[in-house]
Image: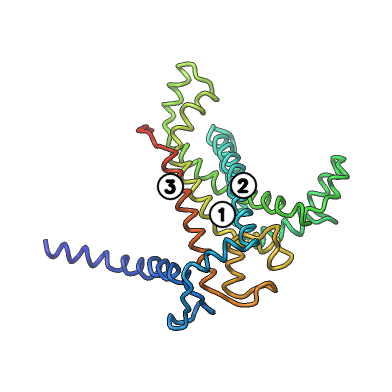
Amino acid sequence: MKNNKKMIVGFLAPAVIIFLIVFLYPIVRTIMMSFFKIDSVTDTTDLWTFVGIQNYEKLFATAIFRKSMLNLFKIWAIGGAIVLSVSLLFGVILTSGIRGKKFFRAVIYLPNLVSAVALATMWLQYVYSSKFGLLKSILDAVGMHKLAETAWLDTDHKFGALLFAYCFGMIGYHMLIWMSGIERISPELYEAATIDGANRPQQFQHMTLPLLKGVFKTNITMWSVSTAAFFVWSQMFSTVTADEATIVPVQYMYMQTFGAGNAVTERNAGYGAAIGIILCICIVVIFTICNKLIKEDDLEF
């Protein structure tokens, strides 16, 4: 018995040590940093200046941070509704026995294989360009010349252009998650429902959706995590470092932590850490609400 315990400890020890060093220690250190004024991320603790909750008070009193949180919420809510609904539609279509399933699945997922920098550059230079962009050419071709003259990258339209481009790239990822859940449902259930007279919309409403509750929570969580870490797209669509039309909390955190941008006169890693803690709390709250609202019934596949 003792030998078995030693063996268990021996196998678990490396994983536990790695978890403590790579995950737990950074989390604890970030929480501590959020209560201090720190000039540089690499400063030793003796150089930290304790300020209590002043970092948090200053954040919520800063208009640009509130704007960044509003932008993030719109990306999460509006973008989430678009991405999850469209990806679910594609998931249902591709699991319905359509021909060329592998081809269409690969095409829809393809944007996820391209780096965010390259994808954003493509949208900026070759889709939204006011001179020779694809969108302008398509609108001109269908006779919408006035709409084709729209400056999609100006202050009034830039956020919508950013949101559409980001959603376009994320649909394939969430589609695969939906498909993994749909393919787990036994075909016999649909056969029985068909025999009982249920049509496809009724089967989707009363069978598919209830059996995808767990998958829906997974998709919501993954979307929330990816949205909270939203940075590259915002940076690429910003003509300056702090563009209020597209700024998000992680971009603002980057500016404050590393002193990037003309608007930042001093660096404060503790201020940036407070932003990270706020984002983490938002994700925990969303996950908790999902668990409370979406109850997984005792359903069998």
Q: Which residue is mark 2?
A: 79
Asked if the residues shown at circle 1 and circle 3 are in contact, with their CB atoms under 8 angstroms apart, the answer is no
Q: Nearer the viewer, mark 1 or mark 3?
A: 3
Q: How far separated are the C-alphas under marks 3 and 2?
A: 20 Å
Percent of width and height locating residue 33? 46, 72
Find residue 85 and report its horizontal and vertical position in percent. Answer: 58, 39
Q: Residues within 10 Å of mark 1 (few under 14, many from 20)?
A: many
Q: Which residue is mark 1?
A: 227
Residue marked by disc 3: 288
| Residue 289 - label | none
Residue 217 x/y as whole percent: 46, 43
| Residue in the image at 79% along x and 51% along y | 134
Q: CA distance from mark 2 to mark 1?
A: 9 Å
Secondary-structure class at tag 3: helix
Q: Earlier in the sequence, mark 3 or mark 2?
A: 2
Residue at 45% across, 23% down = 191
User: What separation in Å lies between label 1 and label 3 (alpha carbons)?
Assistant: 17 Å
Q: Give the quarter of the image for residue 184.
A: top left
Contact (CB < 8 A) between labels 2 and 1? yes
Is 41 rendered above or below residue 59? below
**Foreground pick, 115 / 296:** 296
Callout 3–callout 2 Cβ contact below 8 Å: no
Residue mark closest to the camera, 3 vs 2: 3
Residue visible at 48% across and 81% down in the picture: 43
Q: Is residue 267 above or below residue 278?
A: below
